[in-house]
Image (cartoon, grey):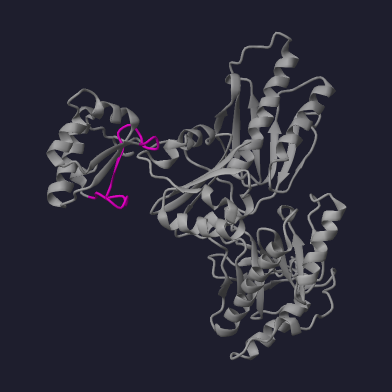
Amino acid sequence: MTSEIIIDAQPQDISIALLEDKKLVEYQKEPRSQNFSVGNVYVAKVKKIMPGLNACFVDVGYERDAFLHYLDLGPQFASFEKYLKQVESDRQKLYPFERAQRLPDLPKDGSVQNVLKVGQEVLVQIVKEPISTKGPRLTGELSFAGRYMVLVPFGEKVSISAKIRKGEEKARLKQIVSRVKPKNVGVIIRTVAEGKEAEELESELKILMKRWEDALNKVRTSTQRPELVVEEQSRVVGMLRDLFNPSYENIFVNDDQVLGEVREYVQMIAPEKVEIVKRYTGNLPIFDAYDVTKQIKSSFGKIVNYKHGAYLIIEHTEAMHVVDVNSGNRTRSENGQEANALEVNLGAADELARQFRLRDMGGIIIIDFIDMKLAEDRQLLYERMCKNMQQDRARHNVLPLSKFGLMQITRQRVRPATDVNVDETCPTCMGKGTVRSSVLFVEQLERLLEKLVKQAGMKKISLHVHPYVYAYINQGIYSQKLKWKFRYGFGLKVVPSQKLGFLQYEFYDKKQQIIEIKDDKFNL
């Protein structure tokens, strides 16, 4: 299996697509102004104690206060609390972490009101994004994730991923890390550390320790509360950290700044693979060139078609996700209805495993498969779903089919599910209900070009239009595009874009920044 990452960096947002064998399996899109907050560490104040919930609400600067349960404080919360006071007591010099005193663990059956009080400062980390009407979820047990390991301040063990099965390799890794790790920290060794040299592991451990020390220095010098002391790396780098695999063939980026970030990160974790990070220089939009746009439009939405006319209906609710499997107008199998149902269900299992990753669906998922009478067919479907879900990095649990033909799946949720609206606003009336003549569309585009060239003085312009409009503009030897170039300069470029509606358009300047045209006279 070959994997590629396609990164589309636009002025307003950044989109990341992961392709496996040219098929879209993961997709993330975030505004540039919005940061991915899971992993961020804050020094904040307790705002409200909730004895009935055995929890508290903490102000970390979000619109809604963050939730911190007693059991999420971590066994070493008392040690963190005492060390935090020592750090804040001396603004001139950082109290060495190696000399921090380890206090007894918090009792598991304790009460939050005996540990915390309103206004108390706490060092906390976000483990779940705000979802719907809920604020972020917090933990007091901090961790700093790297490529090969996770650093846990005030931890005491060196733990190893259960996916590393060789006893000799486990012993080797544990010996290396135990020898180099500082006092008062624990380490979790990740699966990708298998086979790595001691120098690589020691180097990353030093990087993670520096992140922790930088956070403590920020706590020491800052007076504002809440204060962000560790900001998770950019969304691009954060996703690469979790996804990066030596089998990747290419990482294509269409922005120089993001290219630099990605190349710097890959250089740090896998110097031998830095050449796979490449700058995309094609004329087509990067997602169009790698067939991502078409896959997004066909894979999102309420109805998702898959092979031989069958389709899924996916509904998102506050409590759970519900999926209905339908055979559609599919021709029945020669072996009868039971074989037909099995084939449709197995195809649905394949598509659903991809949809879970693609939409990042989390929480409870209920799937209504087509009824099957034979127990061996139901078992085969269950095994197929379990096998498909092995590719999923999120923690999950798959239950066998119930007697009603329903399958229940729980999947780790750390952020809202990705829901891309694939419906397009009417490009002619922009939702107003009045339609202008489409015959005059090219003439209206020409008036806009004239305005940009003669009034605004622009020499290099890219016009993005729907592929059908692009074909019309390019038809004939003496095409409309050629006429425009002679009339307005050869700096004009016309580009087909699959993301645009039939009569939608976008103008870009020489820096590939979108040109906003707010004059109603020219707004189609």
User: What residue do we see at 56% from left, 67% from top?
Assistant: 231
Give the quarter of the image for residue 189: bottom right
The secondary structure that most of the magenta stretch takes on is loop
Q: Give the range drawn in magenta.
A: 497-518
Give the quarter of the image for residue 46: bottom right
Q: Where is residue 336 in the image (x, y as percent from the top left)?
A: 73, 10
Residue 17 visible to the viewer = no
Q: From what the image shows, is residue 344 above or below residue 85?
A: above
Q: Quadrant of the N terminus?
A: top right
User: What residue do we see at 61% from left, 15% from top?
Assistant: 330
Q: Position of residue 6 (x, y in %)?
A: 50, 44
Indicate whether residue 500 is drawn in magenta.
Answer: yes
User: What residue do we see at 56% from left, 65% from top?
Assistant: 64
Residue furthest toward the right? 167
Residue furthest toward the top? 334
Q: From what the image shows, is residue 333 above or below residue 241?
A: above
Frontmost residue, 493 versus 515: 493
Give the quarter of the image for residue 53: bottom right
